[in-house]
Image (cartoon, rainbow, N blue to C red):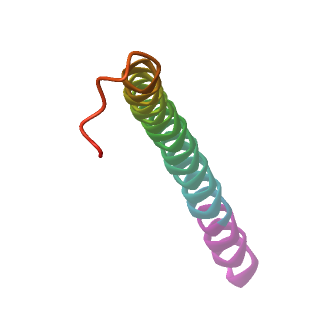
Amino acid sequence: MKKVILIMMLAGLATTFQSCRETTQKKTQDAVEAIGEDIEDNTKKAGKKIKDGAKKVQEEVQEEINNTDDVN
């Protein structure tokens, strides 16, 4: 009788650990996907800032070339 109870407890314990691993794997995958989305969003934001900065530099260069710069 003790062996039967022990086997049943071990089987239940093994099932519990298996389901925990699947849950952990799912959470990890969700976190990785969220990180990927954050990287993509931040890359787009950085690209926009770089383009805006390049546009400002181009405008300043044109002002210098055309002698319309506000600096004396």
> How far from the left and from the top, in percent, is residue 53?
42, 33
Report the residue at 69% width, 84% height from top: 2
Q: Which quadrant of the view contains residue 52?
A: top left
The one nearer the camera, 60 or 36, is: 60
**Above or below for 45 versus 6:** above
The one nearer the camera, 65 or 24, is: 65
> How far from the left and from the top, in percent, is residue 12?
59, 63
- Tell whether 1 sits left or right of 58: right
> How far from the left and from the top, in percent, is residue 4?
69, 71
> How far from the left and from the top, in percent, is residue 27?
49, 49
The stretch in magenta equals 1-13
Q: Magenta span has 38?
A: no
Report the residue at 45% width, 30% height from top: 57
- Tell whether 70 sits left or right of 26: left
Magenta stretch: dominant secondary structure: helix
**Above or below for 27 versus 36:** below
The quadrant in which the N terminus is found is: bottom right
Q: Which quadrant of the view contains residue 5?
A: bottom right
Report the residue at 50% width, 47% height from top: 31
The one nearer the camera, 44 or 13, is: 44
